[in-house]
Image: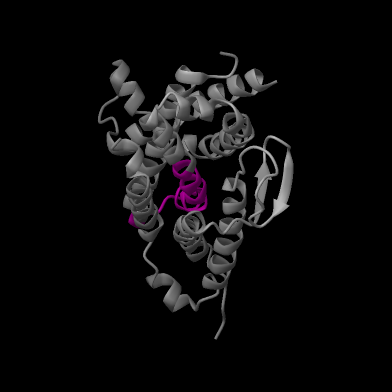
Amino acid sequence: MWITLLIAHGLSAFLLLGAITHQAVGVWLPARDRSTHFLNRVRAAPPTSYVNAIIVLFVATMILGGVIYTNYRIAARFTLEQGRFWKTFGAFELKEHIVTIGLGILPAYWYFWRQPLREEYARTRAMLTTVLAFVVWWGFLVGHLANNIRGLGT
Amino acid sequence: MKIVPSVRVFAVTFTAAFSIIYVLAVEYNWALFSYAPATRQFGPLVTPATAGPTMYWYGWMATTAIGAGVIAGLASLVPEGVAKRVWSGWSWVVPIGVLVAFAYLLRGYFMR
């Protein structure tokens, strides 16, 4: 069961990473022309179209991670301690807090991305997306790193 | 004077309060409940596990969510004139500040 949950958590995180990255790129580097170049197509994605998916995926990923976390505490965490992987250990401790702060950001993120978008909140939207992107990238990379050292089923 | 709950003030206050209460909950261990993963038992407030590690993270989040919800609920009732002056930027400035605070609190792991 743990491996299934871990895979579901990873897949959900992967989708979330794609959505938030697309939105962040669309916010900070919007496409100026409609050329068919790959990078322009990435930049041309409308940032508003990702909002609901990002909120749902963030919550789903966090719930799955929260369930797996119980197993991490009684298994993988000791391996990190005994192996003296302190940087990975610390990064994972930080992940726990960073994703929680990300969860707390969601109400404001939802509100300021509501249609119709108001121009005076453009900076707030951009910054909330950026903070959320940092949260998701940190969570993804650190989770991947910890799993490489002592993943479920290893 | 008519008071209409402001969703904008609720959203901004909730996010800012959530960040601040969470870092305090972690630092002072204000867990609403505890969980022992080895025995799969929950306990009220800070209850050490009878075997294995004790997890407070879920309890910290519960404390934080309730606290932020109450504060944001009350803040959303401010008069319209005050509500308009609440800066939307608090919703990202405070979380960034708290993220930096956590990095500082956990710096020991990265300096070994």
Span colored in magenta: A97-120
Please state, as top left, top right, bottom left or bottom right, where the N terminus of chain B lies in the image.
Answer: bottom right
User: In this figure, which colouring scheme has been used for the structure?
Assistant: one colour
Residue extending farthest bottom: B1
At 70% across and 44% down in the image, what residue appears? B50
Q: How many marks?
A: 0
Q: Is residue A44 left or right of residue A59?
A: left
At 54% across and 37% down in the image, what residue appears? A58
Image coordinates of residue A19 in percent, x first then y, are 46, 30
Image coordinates of residue A82 in percent, x first then y, are 47, 26
Image coordinates of residue B93 in percent, x first then y, are 34, 56
Q: Judge by depth and name the residue closer to the eye, A23 or B68.
A: B68
At 60% across and 44% down in the image, what residue appears? B55
**Hey, which quadrant is residue B70 in on the image?**
bottom right
Taking the image as drawn, is residue A46 in sight?
no
Q: Is residue A117 magenta?
A: yes
State whether the magenta stretch is mostly helix, strand or loop. helix
Taking the image as drawn, is residue A44 in sight?
yes
**Hey, which quadrant is residue A20 in on the image?**
top left
Q: Is residue B49 magenta?
A: no
At 61% across and 60% down in the image, what residue appears? B66
Residue extending farthest top: A154
Please state, as top left, top right, bottom left or bottom right, where the C terminus of chain B lies in the image.
Answer: top left
Q: Judge by depth and name the residue closer to the eye, B6 or A2.
A: A2
Residue extending farthest left: A32
Figure check: A25 above or below A104? above
